[in-house]
Image (cartoon, helix red, strand yellow):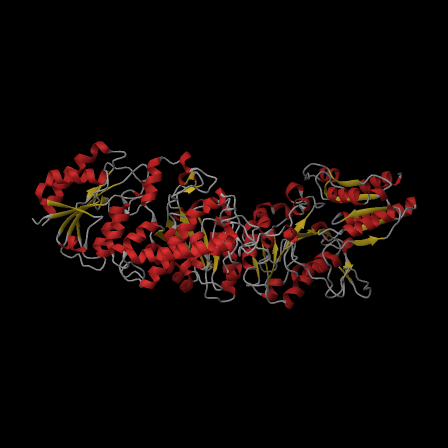
Amino acid sequence: MKNIGLFYSFNTKNTSAAAQIIKSELGEKVEAVNVEEATEDDFKRFSNFILGVPTWWDGELPNYWDEFLPCLEDDSMEGKTFALYGAGDQKGYPDNFVDAIGLMVNFIEARGGNIIGFVPNEGYDFHASKALRNGQFVGLPLDFENQEDMVKSRILNWLKTVINDFQ
Amino acid sequence: MGRNQKFSIKNTPKETLEKWYYLMFLGRKIDEKAPNYLKQALGWSYHAPYAGHDGIQLAIGQVFEKNKDYLFPYYRDMLTALSAGITETEIILNGISKADDPASGGRHMSNHFAKPEWNIENVSSCTGNHTLHAVGVARALKRYGEKAVAISSQGESSVSEGYVYEAITGADREQLPVIFVIQDNGYGISVPKKDQTANRKVIDNFSGYKNLHLIHCNGKDVFDSMNAMDSAKSYVLETGNPVILHANCVRMGSHSNSDAHELYRDEDERNYVKQYDPLAKFRRMLLRYKRFAEDELETIEKKALANLKKAHKKAITSADPSSESIHDFVTPEALVSEQYPEGIHNIKNKEKIKLITALNQTLKDEFRRNPDTYIWGQDMANKEKGGIFNVSKGMQQEFGKERVFNAPIAEDFIVGTANGMSRYNEKLRIVVEGAEFADYFWPAMEQLVESSHEYYRTNGKFVPNITIRLASGGYIGGGLYHSQNIEAVLTTFPGIRVVYPSFADDAAGLLRTSIRSRGITLFLEPKALYNDPKAEAIVPDDFMVPFGKARIRREGEDMTIITYGNTLPMSLEVADILEKEDGVKVEVLDLRSLSPLDTDAIIKSVKKTNKVLVVHEDKVFGGFGGEVAARIASDAFEYLDAPVRRVGAEFTPVGFNRILEKAILPDNQKILEASRELLLY
C-alpha cells in the first residue's frame, strides 16, 4: 500500500485530536500535511488520502479547506482514493450534521476520485446531513460535543475497514 | 464548489479582483470607523456593522444595475450600497445625517443607505417591510416588459414577519422577477434563529412553493456569493420566476452600537465568528493564488484610506438640514381644477345619480383617460362581480385583467405592493380597495404608516401615488366588523390625505382629484349611502373637488352643524325640522376632507352662527370631532355663545342586533335633541 496523505488543519482541537489517534494507529503509513499551508504539489504526491473535514456553522467547509480547494478544482482525481472524517454536532446543528463531509465528497467525486470508508448511520441522532447517502455516511462522523466517549472507538473501527480499502 | 464557476480566485480578471478588494477594504474601514462618529458626538447614532456579510453584500451591489434594476437594501447593507455605486462620501453623509445625504437629507435614521434616483430605494427600519415593495415594483417590471429584477435584501429574522410571507407568496403566485436575498447571521438582535424558525436555513421553509427557486450560498465567501447572485439574476431574467437566496453569514460584532453582544454570546462564539472574517479570507486567497503581491494589496489599501480621509473631511463640513425645512415634502401638492377651484358646481340640467354610480363612472373615466391606472382588491373582479359592493363593476371587462384584478385576502400585501408598483414611474396611478370593509384594514396599517412617510423620508424623492378606497361605517346591521369608522386613527398620520364624501358629486370630484394627484389618499366611502336616494346628486363631467375644501350644504345663521359621511344627510334633515318646527336656520357644513381640514370654512361659519354642533358617526370619545372642537376653542373662542357640543357613537363597539346598533350610533333624534339643547344658549 502506498503512503497515505493525512490532510487536516494543525490549528484545530478536535480534528487534530482525531488525527493523533490515526497517526498512532497507522504509524509510518501516514504523512500529515497541514491543509492551511498545503500546495497542489503536496496533493499530487499522494494517491491515498485521509482528510479531516469538520463542519463549520450551518453546514460549511472550514475556511482553510475553502481556500485550498481552488488549487485542485481543475485537476482530475481519477486513480486517487479518499477516506474522510469530520467533526459535527448532532444536537446543536441537527439539520447540517457533518455536511462538510458531504460537500467534500461531492467535490472529489466530481473530479473522478474514489471514496471509501462509508459508515452506517446507526448510533447517531440528527435530522439531516449532506454526508448521508442511502443510509450510510460517506465518511466518519465524530461528535466531540455529545459523544466524545465514542470518538476513539469509532476511529479505530473505521480504520480497520479503511486500511484494507486503500491500494 | 462546482466546476466551471463563472467567478473563482483563478479565473476572475485581476482588475475585477482589485475593484472588489478596494470596495471590501474601504467598506470595512468605514464600518470600523462609524462608531467613532458617535463617540465624538458627530452622529451615526445607529450603526449596524456588516462585518461578516462581506461576500454577499459585495455580490448584491455588483449584480445590481442602476436605473434598471431596483434594489431595496436593509439597514446592515453598507457594503451593498458601496458596491452598488454609492460613494464613501455619501455613506458618511448618511451616517452623520447631513442635508446632502442622498437617501433622505438627514431625515431618516443613519445607516439606511439609499439613492432613489438610481433605484436604490430608501427603506423602512421595520425589518423586511420593503419585501412587499420589491414585489410591487416587480409587478410593474413584468407588466411593462422590462428585462430587470427587483432585489430585496434583508436579515433572516425578517422572515418571521407575516408580511414577508405575504410578499414571497405573492411573487411566487404572480411569477414576478424578484430576488429575495436573506442574509443569515444567526441573530435578530439577540434572538437566536432557533427562536425564529424551525428550519435553521429559513428559506427551506419555502421549499414547497411552486415557482420559487431556492439558492443557498456562503455569504462570507466572495466567489460563492458572486456565483450565487449572478446565477440568481440570470435565472430570474430567463424564467421570469422569483428566487430566494440564502446567504450564510456571521455577525462579527454586535447588532448595533446600542447592543452589547457580550451579554448573550460567549467568548468562544465571539472568537469563532471572527475566524470567518470574509475580508481576511479574500486577502489570504489573493496572496495564496498569487493574484496580488503583498505590496500591491497595501497600495490598494492606502488608496482606500486616502479616499476615506477625503470623504470624511468633505462630509463633516457639509451642511446640516435646516429647521425651516421640516414642513417640506410632508404631502405633495394636490391638483386643483381651474373649473372647480372650490369643488362646487351649479349644474342643474342633468339627472341625479347614485353615489355608487358616481364612483363607478369616475373610476372608468379615469381609467380611460390614463392607461397607466390600475386597481386591485379583494373581490375586485370575477365575471359579473366587481367589488364587494360592485363599485368596480364592469371594469375588468373594459380594461382587462392586467389593470383590474383580484388581490389575495392579504390587506398589507394590497397596500404594500401598491407602494412598490408606484415606484416604477410617476405616470402610474393605483387605486386599491384596501379591504373588503374598513373594519378589515387594520392588517394594512403597517404599510399605510410606512407609505405615509415615504415622501418625507426620501426628502421628496419618492411618493406613492395611491388612492385607497374603503367602504366605511355602519347603519347596515353589520355588527362589530362591518360598521367601523377608522378616520380618527387615519388622520393622525402626516403624509396621507383622508376624505369622507357623502353625496355623489363630492365623491366623484374627490375620487378624480385623488387619482390625478400625487400622493396617498384614504378615500372613505359611506357604504350605507351607496344606493340611498339621499346621497344622489348631479355630477358634472370632469368634476373635481380639491382637498381641504369644506362645502356648505345648507346656509343658516343660528347654529352650525359640522359633519361628514353618513351623518350629513341626517344633519340636513334635522336642519329642515328645526326650521320648520322651531323657526331657526341651521347651517350645515360638510367637511368632505378631514386631512387636510378646511379650518377657514369652520371658523368662518362659527363667526356667523356662534353655536356649533359637531356630528359624526364615529365615537365621540377619541373621534375626529375632538380635533374640530379643539380648533374652534383655540381659534374662535371669542365668537362662541355656547360650548361646542358633539354627537357621535357611544364608546362601545357596534352591536349586531338592530336594537343595539340604533342605541349606539347617532341618528336624527339624537342630533335634533342636541341641537335644541345648544340652541337654548
Q: Nearer the viewer, residue B418 or B398?
A: B418
State which quadrant residue A78 falls in.
bottom left
From where the camera sits, is residue B170 visible?
A: no
Residue at 51% of width from left, 56% of height from top?
Answer: B121
Asked if residue B620 lies left or right of residue B459, the reply is right
Query: Quarter holding the C terminus of chain B?
Result: top right
Asked if residue B62 lies left or right of residue B347, the reply is left
Q: Give how far across and how far down residue B585 sits, in percent.
A: 89, 48
Q: Give how far across and how far down residue A64 sits, in percent.
A: 26, 48
Q: Give how far across and how far down residue B502 sits, in percent.
A: 74, 53
State which quadrant residue A85 falls in.
top left
Q: Give how far across and how far down residue A43 sits, in percent.
A: 16, 53
Q: In the rendered view, tell whether residue B647 sits above or below residue B529.
A: above
Asked if residue B60 lies left or right of residue B400, the reply is left
Residue at 57% of width from left, 56% of height from top?
Answer: B418
> Among all residues in the image, which is located at the extreme right?
B583
Q: In the rendered view, tell whether residue B341 sits above or below residue B680.
A: below
From where the camera sits, is residue B603 visible?
A: yes
> Among all residues in the image, which is located at the extreme top?
A149
Q: In the rendered view, tell whether residue B369 sits above or below residue B641.
A: below
Give the number of callouts. 0
Query: Quarter holding the N terminus of chain B?
Result: bottom left
